[in-house]
Amino acid sequence: MPPRIVEIIRGMRGGGDRNVARLRRKRAITHLCWKSWPILSLTLLVTGYAWMLTIPSTLHGQKTYIDENALQPSQVTTYWGWTDVHRTDGYLDALEALRDRNASGNEYANYISTEFRKLGVPAATQNYQILTSSEPLNGTNAFAILSAPRASGAEAMIVSASRISMDGHLNLRGISTVLSLAAFLKGYSLWAKDLIFIVSDGYLDGMQAWLTAYHGLSQSNIISEPLTLSSGSIWTALNIDYPGHSFSHLGIFFEGLNGRLPNQDLLNSFQKISLYTGGVPVTVYDHYERGEFPDRDLADIPWWVPHAAMNIEAVKEYVYRAKNIMRHVGYQARGRASGVHGLMHQFRIDAFTMFAIPSAGPHGFHALGRVLESTLRTTNNLLERLHASFFFYLLVGTTTFMKIGSYLPAPVLVSTAMLFSGLGEWARARWAEEPVGPDEKEREPGLGTQWVQRKRPVLPAILFVIGTHLNGVLLFCLIASPWASRNKIFTYPFLVAQAFLFPLLLSLATTKTSSPSTTAPTYQILKSINLCLASTVISITSVLNFSLAATLAILLGPPLIWSGPGKYRHIKAAGYCVLGLGWLLLLPQEVQKALWNWEVLGVWFAPFVCTVYVPLVVQAAIATVLIH
Amino acid sequence: MDFHYTFSALVAARALLAFAPLPDALKYSQQLSSPLTSYARLKEGVYLFSHGIDPYSGGLFRHSPLLLSAFTTLLPLKDPISKLLWTACDAAAAWSLVKIWRLRQRVGKSSRDGLIAALYLLNPYLFLPSLALSTSSLENTALLVAVAFACERRSSASILLLAILTHLSFSSIIYILPIFLLLTSSPVSNLASPRPFALDFKGLRKAVLPLVGEYFAYTTVLTAASTLVCGGSRAWVEKTWGSFFLLPDLTPNPGLWWYFFTEMFDHFRPFFLMVFSLHLLIYVLPITIKFQHDLLYATFLMAGVSATFKPYPTLSDPGLFLSLWSLFPETYSYLRHPIVTALIHLHGSLLLPLFNHLWLATGTGNANFFYASTLVFGIANGAGLIDAIWAGLATAIPVKDGDWDVGQE
C-alpha cells in the first residue's frame, strides 16, 4: 500500500480512548477533504467538459423504438392515389395564380376557406393583428374542422401548413396538400378524433393567434377574432412544410418554445411510416444521413482534422452527430421553435414539422399524401395522450437517440464543480493566517503563524446579489422598451454603463472598516454566493432545458471559478464585460429576434439572459475588482 | 433609522405588492395554499353557506366554521378587503416577532428590530402564500401573537389565541406544551446556561392546571360556537379537524404525506395514518424536556417540526420557522452547516414550482418529479431543524478553537 494511504489510515484509526480516536478520525477526514478539495473541484470540472465532448461519440446512444403499443405505425393499407395527386395539383394551380397576382394573405384565406366549404367541411377564417415594438403584423388564418364520424369529438388532431415556409418561400405545396387531404380524409368513416385543418398566415404569428384564440387565452398584444368553430382537446399535430418543387427526403423539426420537445413516439412512428409506407427516407432537420452523399460527409468535417482521420467511420459519425446536436442546441437553448409546430407544445400538443427538403426529385404529392394518411391513422389509434416514450432526449441521428441519463451528467458535473468551489471559498473565508503572539510587540519572526477564525457577514454580499439581479430586471425593461429599439447606436453604450459599469463603480464606492483578520472580505463571500447561485441555476435549468444548461455551463464555469482579485484584475473585469454584455454589440440581430420571441411567443430566453445570466457575470466582476 | 419608519415602509411595500397586478396562477399554486387553507375554497364555502347549502356536506370545503361565520357576517369576502386583511395580519405577525425579540433581550428597542421585521415581511416563503391569500398566513399570525402574549405573561390573551390557532389548524396542538411552560417561565435566552425548570412538579401543576382549564374552556366555547354556526350539525368536525388525521384530500402539496398515501393500498391506510399522526407528536416531549431552560427555543423547534412533518403544509410553515430563526443570533456561530441548508432550500424552492409545472402544465413530467422535489424540500427543512437543535445545545458548551472539540456520544 502506498505510504500516504497507510498514514491516512493510521491517522483515522488512532489509539487509546475511543472518543479521542473518533475525534482524531473526524479531523483526519476533514483534513483530507480540505486537502483534496481543489483537486476534486478541478476533476469534476474536467470530467464535465470531457463528458460534453463525448456526447456526439458512438459511446452513447441507442436505437429508437416505439413504446406505445396503440400506435401500430405503418400497419395500414393506404388509399391515397393519383386522383388525389391530381386534385392537389389543381389546388396548387389556383394558389400559384394567387401568388402571381401578388394576392394578400386575406385573399389566400378566403380562397382556402371557400374551397374547404365546397368540400362540405365547415370552415372559417380568423383575422388577427399582433402589435410588436417594431411593426404590427396583420393576417388571416383559414381553418376547417372535420367532425369525427365515430366519436364525440372530445379529442382532435391538427394538420397544418403555414403560408410562409421556414426557408422564407411560400409554402404553396404544403397548403394544397392540406386542402386535398381534407377532401380525401372526408371520404373515410374511421376517424375517432376530429381533424382540424389550419392554414395559418405568416410564418409563426398566424398560428400563435389561432392557438391562443382556440385555447381561450388573451395575450395583450394580439387582437384576433374569436374562432367560430371549435372542437375538443388537441393531442397531436402534423405541420407540413413543402416549399420546393419536389423533395428527396422528409426532415423532422421538433423543438418547441422554451425547449419543450414532443414525445419521441411521434417522431419514431413518423420515421417508420415515411420509410416503409411512403418510401421516403427521413432526416433529422435537413442534414442528410451519413453515407448517403459520401462527398458531402467530407465537406462537413472541419479543415483542421488530419487527412488520415477523415476517412475513419467513427470520426464521420462524430461529425454527423455533432452537427445534429449543435443545431438542436441552437434551437433549444434560445427557446426557439424550429418550425410552426413548436408553438403547439405550450398547449401540451405533441407536434413536429415535416420539411420536404427541396430537390429535383424523386418524391412529390403522391408519397407525401401516403405518409400523411398513414401517420394520421397511427395517431388516430391513440387512446390516451402520448406519454409512454421519452420527453427528454437528444435525437443524434434519424434512428439513434440519447436518454437523459447519458447527457445530463455533463452540465451537472460542471455545476457541481462550481458548487464545490463555492463551498471551498466559503470555508476559506472562515480562516485567516496570523503570526503567533497575543499582540504585535511580542511577535517574533521565528514563531510561525496560526490560523484564526473570522466572521463571515453575508448581508453585504447578499445585497450585492439582489442589487445586480434587480439591475438585470431594469436592463431587460430598457432593452425591451420601444425607445431602445428606435435609437440602437446611442443606447448600447448607455446599456453597458447601466448593466455593468454602474454596479461596479457603486460597489467600489462602498467602504468597510473591519480588519481582514477578524472579518472575511466581502469579495470572498460574494464569490462563494455567486458560484453557489450559478451552480444552482445550471443544475435546475438542466432538467428543463438541457441545451441552455450546457451553454451556461460552458460560458460560466471557468470564468466564475477563477474570479477574484489578482494581478490583472482590470483586464479580467473587461473580460467579464465582454462575456456578460458582448452580445449587445456583436449580435444585434439575435437581440431583436429574442425580443420578438418574447413579445409575441412568450419565450423567456431574453428575460432570462438579462435577469439571470448578466447579473451572475456582473457579480463575478464585482468580486474581482472589490478591494475589501 | 427609526424602527417605526422602517416598519411602516415595509408594510407599505407589502401593501403595494398585494395590490400589484400579479398572475392569477399564484392563487391556485399548490405550494402556496393547501386544500385546508385555499382562498378559492374559502370563497366557495362562503358562497354555499350564504345560499343556504351546508358547505360541509361536500368534500371541498375544509375551513373552520369560525372563518365561515367571520367572512359572512363581519367582513365580506371581497378581494380588496381580503388583501388588506392579509397584509394587516402579516404586519401584526411581524410586529409580534419584534416584540418577542425585545422581550427576549429585555430591551425597549434595538438596532436589530428593523431587520427582524424585514425578515418576516420580505421572506418569500411567507409573503407569497399571503399574496395567494392562503389562510396559513392567518394561522402564523395567531401563533406569533400568542407567543408574544406568552412572553409578556399575559396568559388569558395568549391562551385564547392558542385555542383559536388549534381550532383553525389542529396540528398546531404541538405548540401547546412549550407555550404553556413559556407562560410560567421567561423568554430570556438561557441557551448558554441550561438549568432545570424553575418549578418542581407540584409547583408546575399548580401553575399549569388553571391554564389548561382556561384553554379547555375557550376550546369548548369555540367548538360550541362552531356547531351553532353550522346549525347544530357536527359534520364540520370530521371535515376540518378530521382531515388532519384522515388525509381525505390528496391534492399535491410541498409536504411529505400526500404522495405516500396516493401510493398506499387501502387496507394499510389506517395504520400509516396513525403512524404519521403520532410521529408529529413524539417530538413534543423530548424537545420540551431538553430545552426546558429556554422554552421560546423549544417553540421555535416545534415550528421546524411542524414545517417538516405536518399533513397539509404550505410554504408559510417553513417560512415561519426560518423567520423565527432571526430571534436567536446567539446560536449562529454554532451552526454546523448553514450554507448547505441554505443551498438545499434554494434548490428545493426552485424545483417545487418547476416540477409542478412540468407535471401539470407542460405534461412532460409526472407525479414522481414533484414528489422528488418535495423530498428535496423535506431534506432542506430537516437539515435546518437538525442544525437548529445542534446549535441550541452547543451554545451551552462554548469551545474556543484549539485543543478542544465537541463530539456527539
Image: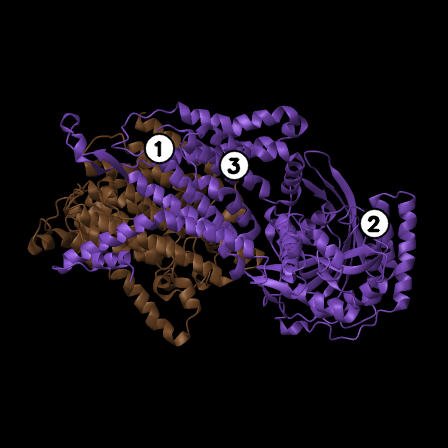
Residue A388 higher or lower than B65, as above or below: below
Q: Nearer the viewer, mark 2 or mark 1?
A: 1
Instruction: Identify the mark nearer the N-term, 3 or 1.
Output: 1
Same chain, marks 2 and 3?
A: yes
Same chain, marks 2 and 1?
A: yes
Query: Secondary structure under badge 1?
Result: helix
Q: Chain of mark 3?
A: A
Q: From the viewer's perspective, is A144 left or right of A542?
A: right
Residue B136 seen anywhere in this rendered image of the structure:
no
Query: Tag on residue A109?
Result: 2
Horizontal and vertical percent position of residue A412: 47, 53
The amino acid type, in three-letter code, at marker 2 is Ala
Q: Chain drawn purple, letter? A: A
Q: Chain drawn brown, letter? A: B
Residue sitting at 19 percent across and 48 percent down? B394
Query: Tag on residue A522?
Result: 1
Q: Front-most of B5 and A208?
A: A208
Question: Residue pushed farthest front?
Answer: A308
Residue sitting at 84 percent across and 55 percent down? A173
Q: Front-most of A548 and A466?
A: A548
Q: Quadrant of residue A262?
A: bottom right
Same chain, marks 3 and 1?
A: yes
Q: From the viewer's perspective, is A607 left or right of B218?
A: right
The amino acid type, in three-letter code, at marker 3 is Val
Real-space CA distance between mark 2 and mark 3, rounded to the nearest whole angstrom? 44 Å
Residue A241 higher or lower than A127, as above or below: below
Which residue is disc 3 drawn over? A614
Query: Secondary structure under badge 2?
Result: helix
